[in-house]
Every structure is written in C-alpha cells, then in structure tokens.
Amino acid sequence: MKLADFTPLNGETDNSKIWKTGAQSNLIAQMSYGGKPYQVKIHAAKPKWYNTDYKISKLEQQISACDPADLVKLEQLNNELDSLRRAKPKYDKKDSVSDAFLDYKQRLIRTVSSIGDANIVPPADYWKEPIEFKGSETFSIDATPWVITDVGHSDKPLLFKDLSERQQYDVIASLAEELDKLHRKGILHCDLKVGNTLIVRQGSGFKGVLIDFDCALILNDLYNQTLPYDAWLNIIGGTFFAPEMQEMFSIASEGEPEDFEAFDFRRITDKVDIFALGVTIYEYYYGEASGSNILPMLSEAGERLDQAAYGAAVAAGYKTDFPDSMPDLLYAAINWMMEADPAQRPTAMQVCEIFRNADASSIPAKYQRNPLWEEHREAYELTLPEGYLIRHARKPYYQFSKNGGSTWFTRSIKELETEHIVKRTDGAGGSGGEGPVVISTYWESDATGEMPKCVRRASTEGKYYVKVDGLEKLATYSDLCTMGVVCTEAECATLWPRDSHLHLTTSNKIIRDLTRGVGYYRYGMFMTVVASKELVGRGIATDNAVKTPLSIRFWARDEEQYEVNPDADTSAISSVTRHVFSGTNYTFNFTDGHSETFTTEQMLNKGYIRRK
C-alpha cells in the first residue's frame, strides 16, 4: 500500500482540509481504498530538534558563547547538559522509524488477524514512505509508518446512551469477550477507551468492536526485552494506564538505568486492559473520566500514582467517587476492575459473565456498595461492616457471612433484623430488645452438635432448610436423617460396598445418599449429588486399581510450549486447576486437603510438566 492508492472520502484535494490532528500529534484522515472506507494515520517521526544529540550540541554551543562571569546561567546550562547526557539512549526520540518496528507491527497484525473475529479490527497494513505536506502547515518527515484500520462496520455511528440497559450490557460483555480472545494470543490492547471502540448492530442485538491497535503490546516481546524503541513510544501514548503500567513507564522515562533493568516486566499482564475497561465502562455511562475524581490517579504534586501509592490510597479508605445514581452492578464491577493489585482484578471472561448475566453475585463483597435492595434502603440500615452481606440472586433475599466469606447463609430482611445484622431506621418493628436468635443449631428436641453448612433452622419449630444442588427445601429432622445429613464422622466417610476399590482423598465430607440407595452427597454450603463414577473425576477419590494421569488445562500462552509429564508422580494430587485471579499460575489440590499454587517454571522444576 502507498498513500497514492487512497482517495479522500470528503473529495478534498487540499491536504490541510483532508488531514486532522489526532492524539500524539498524529494526522488522521478518512480515505477510500478498493471501494472500502479506511481510517489512515500518519505517525509523524520526530524532527531533528527533538533528538537528544541535537539538543546536546546546541547546549554546548550556548555554554561556549556564555559570559564566564554569568555563573547562574552557566550552572543552569551545565545542569541541563548533564541531565541530557544521563538520559537513557533506549528512549531517545529518533528521526525515523526502524525496520524492527515495522516487523513488530506486521507480527501484531498477523496475530490479531488470526483470531478471526470480525469485531476485533486490527490495522490492515503498516509501511513507511517519505512524505511532505504543503498547506496551512508544512510537515517534513524522513520516514513515516502508516496504519490503515477498517472502519466499514457501521454506516451510521450508534451511541451507547441510545441503547436499552440489556443492550448496553451486551455491548460491554462482547468487548470483554473480545479482550479475552486477544489475551489468549498474548496481546494487550493498552489503549482501551470509548474512542477506540465501535457499537454495531448484529442480528437483533448489539455488540462492541475493538479498533485502534496503535498502542497494542505483544507480551512476549516485553518479557524478553526485545520490544523496539518505537513501540515503547507508541505504548506510552495510551490513555488509562493501570498503576503498574504507570510505574513501569515512570521508571523508564525518569528513573536510572539500573532501576529499569530491575523492574519485573511480568508484573505487566492482561489485567492492565481490565483496569482500562473499567474506566471505559464509566465513560460509556458518565462521560469523560480523566477530568473526574473516579481515580486517585494524581498526587498533590500532580504526578500520576504508581501501584504502591495507588494501593495505599485505597487501603487508607479512599472510595472511588462514583455518582450516587450509578447502579449497584456497575459500581461493584468497575470497583473490582479498578483494583490496585492486578492479581485481584477479574479476568476478561469474568467481566463478560457479569454483564452477560446481569448478575453481580460473583463480585467479591468488598467491592460491593450498600447491598440492601432498593425497597429496603429507606427502612433499614446495616449494623455490621459492609462485606458481610450481599444480595441473593433471588430477590429480595440476601446472603450473609459470619466469617468473612467462608460460609454464607440465605436470609430475608426480617431474619437479618432478628439477628441484628440490620436495624430499622424509622423506629418501627424491631426485635423488642430480645437479643439475637441463634438459628445455626438444631432445635432442642433434636440432636445437638455442629450443624452442617447446608442446613439452617427454619422459623417454624422442628423444621429446617436444607440446600441440595443450589435449591433450599423444607425438611424435618427425620428427613435430614433419611438423607444422611445427620451422621457421625465414621458414617460420613463410608463408601458403598460396590465402590470399595476407591479411596477418599478430600477433607470435605462425603455421605451416602440413603434416599436413593446409590451415589453420594458432598456437602459444604450446598449438598451436591455426586454419582460413584464422578468421585474420581472431581478429585474426591482415587481409584486404587487405576493410575490416574495428571490432567492440566493449560493457559493459552503455555499450551504451545508444555505438556503433562506422563512419568510424574501424581499419587498425592487430586486435581489441578488454573489460578483464575493470577491469569498465569496453577493450583494443585492434594489428597491431604491442602492446596498450593505454582508458576509454570515451578511445575517444570517439580517434574509435573515438560517442554514439548
């Protein structure tokens, strides 16, 4: 491709009317190529007066010409000269783009294009050619990379505010799903914002489209430190930097070389895009984010905060300044995505599921706002710290935890009042000062001892609620005995005779399903029905007659390089899962009940996996 192959869509011939100045002083025009519309960008290489060597030579000339008696002026010039000489050459402003940069961009195009998603629109091409414009301004550029982005998705731009709530959630879910596809290819967008997305109609619904990959990053190039200097300059042009990204660039541009070499580049993960997606969602609903107070992104000196400072601000009680009218789902989701610690942010697919299902129940309690349903907020207020209570998926019930989230109980608003978790603000009702009613034990006429987590005492004497496969059903004490819920420790660990070849490997309780006479219940928060043949697959038991091979579902970045070692000793391992919060590590569940998280390198060293 060459510039001469393109025709301006507005029919102009005057360059000053064709080209508009965009971000980072780029020139942007809407052009036609082969009958299709494209957005063409000129990423202008910096002229000589931006070059550090040129600045040094000019300063040396000024020092030579300076009056020796003007000590203040001499000191100022010498300090500037010293500062320039200590600048990192790696980040010097060059006069032209490098071939390594163009190769990097072509690899980026190929990788993103290989995803095959029509709603992820990578650049069509990058090249460089000498060009000079004459118009209201004159541009003299030695070499210029060009990027062509296909913007032919929509004849008329669709506005987010014109969509229904369900349609808006669909757009956000689709953007998150597209990010997940990018991340599986080891690509970060690095400049996610409203201006770099489109909304298109597809079938009867709407989806978001990712465009503008100017700042996109190939993670392996960063980790291997093979990123061309031109690419660094591109990425710095991103808009909403996550704190860890800001910290890296602050060290790169202002720190000493040894500080930059010591920086752990693997702190930069796909979670930087999740952070930016949170700010983008805010922008969709409430407009420009950079001029608001939704982030403690600036210090008193006006400098952006790095991860440590941002985290300290949050830990000190800083609350993101969201509008009171913001729906609770948005509040919790954005709060989670803008977490200071990248390891605690959600994955792209977790964000996708939140908005696809319009359900905030999977969001950790500490990111939730006032959890009371709207119809309860005027009459009630919490008497326990936020985080103990979240809304239940079945309105208007709640889930309450006494131990910070390890165990949850379903409650109505009246039950919460009885247990002094909430109190009325209008003075009506109340428990009459009788004190909390304990409902986590059996009725006096029945057995004593610790009640299983899947059972709670009902308000009617002699009755209980038991949770089976996610549903609560009313039961008597006799029903609980028949189901096997009430049993001794020995009975809980008893297998049916036909399963004698199995060995239980988990500390979680397994009880025989006495109601059906086959299979088992596994209980924790809920009783879950488990067939005999599922015990091994779920890591609950091992088959003494069969050696169970290790099963690992690798992350996309690992599956091309590694495979399970068939000779690995798996006798003490019940199962392996991907560590979803890190996005890179793996959790090993052992037969003695404990779990450990390993990196790929640790798994390799322990002999669990091997290189292909």
Image: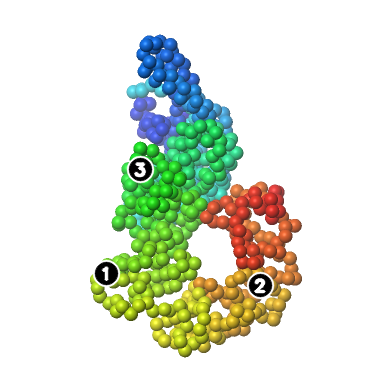
**Rendering quarter of residue 106:** top right
Q: Secondary structure at mark 1?
A: loop
Left or right placement of residue 70 versus residue 560 in this view: left
Q: Residue at x 38, y 44 (%)?
A: 297
Using the numbered discs, state the Cα–Cα distance from disc 1 to disc 3 in whole angstroms.
38 Å
Amino acid, disc 2: Leu
Q: Secondary structure at mark 2?
A: strand
**Rendering quarter of residue 14:** top left
Q: Residue at x 44, y 30 (%)?
A: 42
Q: Residues within 10 Å of mark 1 (few under 14, many from 20)?
A: some
Q: From where the camera sits, is residue 45 visible?
A: yes
The percent position of residue 177, horizontal first and vertical second, equals 49, 53
Amino acid, disc 1: Thr
Label at residue 290: 3
Q: Secondary structure at mark 3?
A: loop
Image position of 454 with respect to 562: above or below: below
Q: Which residue is mark 1?
A: 425
Count of picture labels: 3
Q: Which residue is mark 2?
A: 504
Compare residues 159 and 382 and report the one nearer the observer: 382
